[in-house]
Image: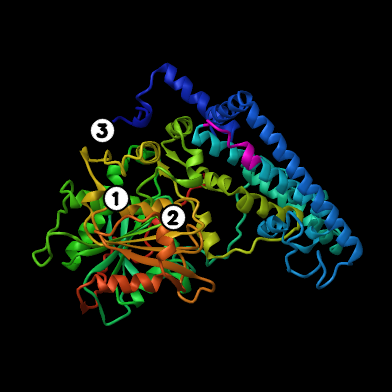
């Protein structure tokens, strides 16, 4: 990188002429007006839908018939519910009372039971039930109306998604006068719930407008190094991009092969070292493993030019080089989410000879990897799930223009995207509790971690979106690491992959595609839960189960659903299953390794995890 004078503009802003600069400025204004969403992308999807509807009289007739059918079902449900309410007074064992017994004769009973917004018994009473079922009927109709014959698949998913967002906005649960639970709470508290909710609404709006800082909703111990990320260890490596933490052993002997964890740079690393009872790191140490984890730097404007090569080379490979040299043994490499994508790139580059490690201890074998574990990590992005709805050329260009102004995507912008994808659970349900019911949110370790957001550098984020999501280069053999094309087929070490059933960030059927991308035996585990809660699933966690099956390299291909039909179900956490797998792919025990103490580096959780920004 050539040096530049302090007066020069940042390098990521230089390659633009006056017209491009004007376009970027206009994009930033549009991004502010449309909450970071591309109006061009939305307009293209709406035009695609409108033109196909206009040119398809048969589809118009079909939608009219479906609307009439939904209206008939809604009217039937309303009449039956009103009659039952009039005949049987509410109470235990009565429809609409305290009984949870389903009433299958009511057309929308199943839909209401599956929607967490309408679980309160008051929603089973007339007239509130008719309001809720009207919304469910409209949602069901729109699912059909948004999928017209001939539409682009991306436009179809966008129209379904944005339609659901609009309907969720006007759901009766979000409005005081149509929410029986809120009205009942106001009556019981003499209006105090509304007064408190009004104060919380004003506070939330003021925070969003930047008029006041976010309130402290978590206790003083909900920070790394105190209540969170407390597993003892030492920082053993620091460069401009990462800190590498080695954890102190708790057993007299450990497996010869260490475990190196690469978390996603989208998140702070301590998602895997939350509280002592649900820390994957602490559990691994207790199982007799030498454990290392990467803590990514929270970037600023000076990091704008960092790209994916930097994250793989100075992040994954630098950490792997240190661990491989320190232990003189192969390493169990594990990556989570985007960290898993980085880990797969590094493994492919090592397997194909496109990357080498600087340290080659004499006692270690030629290949530095003993295995590769991918947790909720995509390597084939052709079917990325709901996140793909927000990723197309117009949206990526808008994000690039937003990032060009500062050199990074802020943590709040990243968090806002995920909240938008799950606005029903993360926005409207929260606001209903706070504004209409006057309830305080009960914080926990996962919520505290989720609020500790990180930035993404402009170049890396742009490369990631384009090469992976838009072009699917990694799965199709076009991805380049430091100028050299790499192939995931060069991964020949055993692979353990974990998908989660409710994952909207990395859908499990997409994660499953690792089976036909690598030249290795693949053990796949499918666990219940979502992208975070499914992974942070400690032994003893109530209600946990997983399916698991190992597929040899020479076994015929099975689709995800065919795999699920034959994969045994195991009750409990997937952690012990993975732990047994790690031991089977290790070569025995050695005396426990105590992390060295460096004065200039300090103890875990290190310095990088402490860096927070107000944006």
Left or right of 392? Residue 474 is left
Q: Nearer the viewer, residue 154 or 328?
A: 154
Question: Residue at the bottom extreme?
Answer: 252
Percent coordinates x, y for residue 530 in the rendering: 50, 59
Percent coordinates x, y for residue 545 in the rendering: 48, 70
Where 578 sits versus 263, above or below? below
Q: Which residues are magenta?
A: 142-151
Q: Give whichever of discs 1 and 2 has the lower sequence position.
A: 2
Q: Nearer the viewer, residue 49 or 375?
A: 49
- Which quadrant would the N terminus be assigned to in this image? top left
Q: Which residue is mark 1?
A: 517
Q: Say if the magenta span includes residue 308.
A: no
Q: Which residue is mark 3?
A: 3
Q: Which residue is mark 2?
A: 508
Percent coordinates x, y for residue 263 in the rendering: 37, 57
Q: Say if the magenta span includes residue 145.
A: yes
Q: Give whichever of discs 2 and 3 has the lower sequence position.
A: 3
Q: Give whichever of discs 1 and 3 has the lower sequence position.
A: 3
Question: Residue at the left extreme?
Answer: 362
Evaluate whether residue 613 shows in this view.
yes
Marks 2 and 3 close (CB-CB < 8 Å) = no
Q: Secondary structure at mark 3?
A: loop
């Amino acid at each position: 990188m050539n040096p530049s004078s302090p007066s020069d503009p940042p390098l990521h802003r230089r390659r633009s002429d006056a017209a491009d600069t004007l376009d970027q400025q206009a994009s930033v204004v549009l991004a502010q007006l449309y909450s970071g969403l591309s109006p061009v992308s939305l307009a293209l999807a709406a035009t695609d839908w409108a033109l196909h509807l206009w040119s398809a009289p048969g589809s118009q007739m079909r939608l009219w018939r479906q609307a009439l059918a939904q209206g008939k079902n809604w009217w039937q449900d309303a009449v039956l519910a009103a009659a039952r309410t009039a005949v049987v007074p509410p109470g235990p064992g009565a429809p609409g009372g305290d009984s949870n017994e389903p009433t299958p004769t009511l057309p929308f009973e199943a839909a209401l039971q599956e929607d967490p917004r309408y679980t309160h018994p008051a929603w089973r009473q007339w007239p509130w039930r008719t309001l809720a079922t009207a919304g469910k009927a409209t949602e069901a109709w729109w699912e059909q109306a948004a999928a017209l014959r001939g539409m682009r698949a991306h436009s179809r998913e966008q129209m379904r998604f944005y339609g659901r967002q609009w309907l969720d906005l006007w759901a009766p649960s979000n409005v005081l006068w149509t929410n029986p639970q809120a009205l009942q709470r106001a009556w019981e508290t003499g209006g105090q719930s509304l007064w408190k909710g009004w104060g919380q609404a004003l506070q939330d709006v003021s925070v969003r407008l930047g008029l006041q800082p976010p309130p402290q909703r978590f206790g003083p111990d909900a920070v790394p190094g105190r209540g969170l990320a407390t597993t003892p260890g030492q920082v053993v490596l620091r460069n401009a991009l990462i800190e590498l933490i080695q954890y102190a052993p708790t057993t007299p002997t450990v497996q010869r092969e260490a475990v190196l964890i690469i978390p996603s740079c989208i998140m702070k690393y301590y998602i895997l070292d939350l509280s002592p009872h649900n820390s994957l790191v602490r559990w691994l140490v207790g199982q007799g493993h030498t454990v290392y984890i990467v803590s990514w730097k929270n970037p600023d404007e000076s990091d704008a030019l960092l790209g994916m090569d930097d994250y793989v080379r100075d992040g994954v490979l630098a950490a792997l080089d240190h661990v491989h040299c320190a232990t003189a043994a192969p390493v169990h490499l594990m990556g989570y989410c985007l960290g898993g994508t980085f880990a797969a790139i590094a493994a492919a580059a090592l397997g194909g000879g496109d990357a080498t490690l600087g340290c080659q201890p004499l006692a270690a074998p030629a290949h530095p990897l003993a295995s590769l574990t991918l947790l909720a990590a995509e390597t084939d992005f052709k079917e990325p799930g709901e996140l793909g709805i927000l990723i197309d050329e117009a949206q990526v260009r808008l994000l690039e223009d937003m990032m060009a102004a500062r050199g990074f995507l802020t943590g709040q912008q990243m968090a806002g995207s995920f909240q938008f994808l799950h606005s029903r659970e993360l926005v409207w349900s929260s606001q209903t509790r706070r504004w209409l019911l006057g309830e305080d949110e009960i914080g926990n370790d996962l919520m505290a971690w989720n609020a500790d957001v990180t930035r993404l550098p402009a170049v890396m984020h742009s490369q990631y979106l384009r090469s992976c999501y838009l072009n699917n280069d990694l799965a199709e053999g076009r991805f380049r690491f430091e100028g050299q094309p790499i192939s995931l087929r060069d991964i020949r070490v055993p692979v353990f992959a974990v998908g989660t059933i409710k994952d909207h960030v990395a859908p499990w059927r997409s994660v499953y595609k690792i089976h036909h991308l690598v030249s290795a035996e693949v053990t796949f585990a499918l666990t219940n839960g979502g992208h975070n809660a499914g992974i942070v699933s400690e032994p003893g966690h109530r209600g946990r189960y997983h399916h698991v099956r190992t597929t040899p390299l020479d076994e015929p291909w099975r689709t995800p659903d065919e795999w699920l039909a034959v994969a045994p179900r195991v009750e409990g956490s997937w952690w012990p299953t993975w732990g047994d797998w790690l031991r089977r792919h290790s070569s025995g025990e050695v005396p426990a390794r105590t992390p060295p103490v460096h004065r200039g580096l300090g103890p875990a959780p290190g310095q990088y995890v402490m860096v927070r920004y107000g944006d």
